[in-house]
Image (spheres, rainbow, N blue to C red):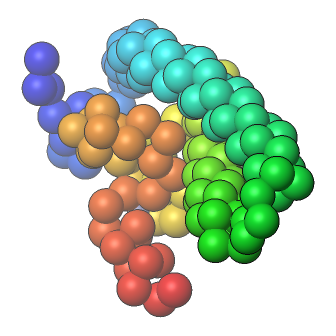
Amino acid sequence: MFEPTFSASSTAGSKTDGGFGMATKKATDYSKFKELLLEKQTAIEKQIIGLRKKIKKSLDEGRVFERNSGDPDSDFVTESSEIERDEMMIMQLEKNLREIDDALQAIDEKFYGECQMCGKSIDKARLRIVPWAKYCYKCQSSLEESQ
Ligand SMILES: [Zn+2]
């Protein structure tokens, strides 16, 4: 299960054959991550649709409320800040969808699981938690520090 696949290339030196077999193994391995990504993609799409409906509903109700109430200001503020929060969430989810798209493309183009910064393979344990990760833990940390 936990064969250190990279040790072959670093210690082989004289014996460099057998790489193809490993590549095939690697490709089948990532199909699990593809499933995971597709599942997550569907879930996020549903979540976005739900939030959009909720916003639309709040806007409709907000308008009715504004017409009928004598002093709608305070309630209207609450309503709009909630909408704002939902819109922020949608933006976050859409960003996540783009990351998932990128990851799915990376799987198809066979560079999935490689850090886009240092080129090292991203830890599988990390990919299980963040299957759309583009960077290894080290590079991600240094990116977040520099932001
Ligand atoms: Zn890296």
Residue drawn at 73 percent across, 70 percent down: 71
Residue drawn at 76 percent across, 42 percent down: 61
Residue drawn at 12 percent across, 17 percent down: 1
User: Is residue 13 visible in the rendered structure shown here?
Assistant: no
User: Is residue 25 visible in the rendered structure shown here?
Assistant: yes
Q: Position of residue 79 (x, y in %)?
A: 65, 58
Specify whether 59 is left or right of 104: right
Q: Quadrant of residue 99?
A: top right
Q: Nearer the viewer, residue 93 or 22?
A: 93
Q: How many marks?
A: 0
Specify whether 38 is left or right of 70: left
Residue drawn at 22 percent across, 38 percent down: 125
Q: Nearer the viewer, residue 82 or 89?
A: 82
Answer above or below: position of 84 versus 109: below
Answer above or below: position of 22 versus 131: above
Q: Nearer the viewer, residue 107 or 54?
A: 54
Q: Position of residue 84 (x, y in %)?
A: 67, 62
Answer above or below: position of 76 versus 99: below
Q: Nearer the viewer, residue 101 or 81?
A: 81
Q: Quadrant of residue 22?
A: top left
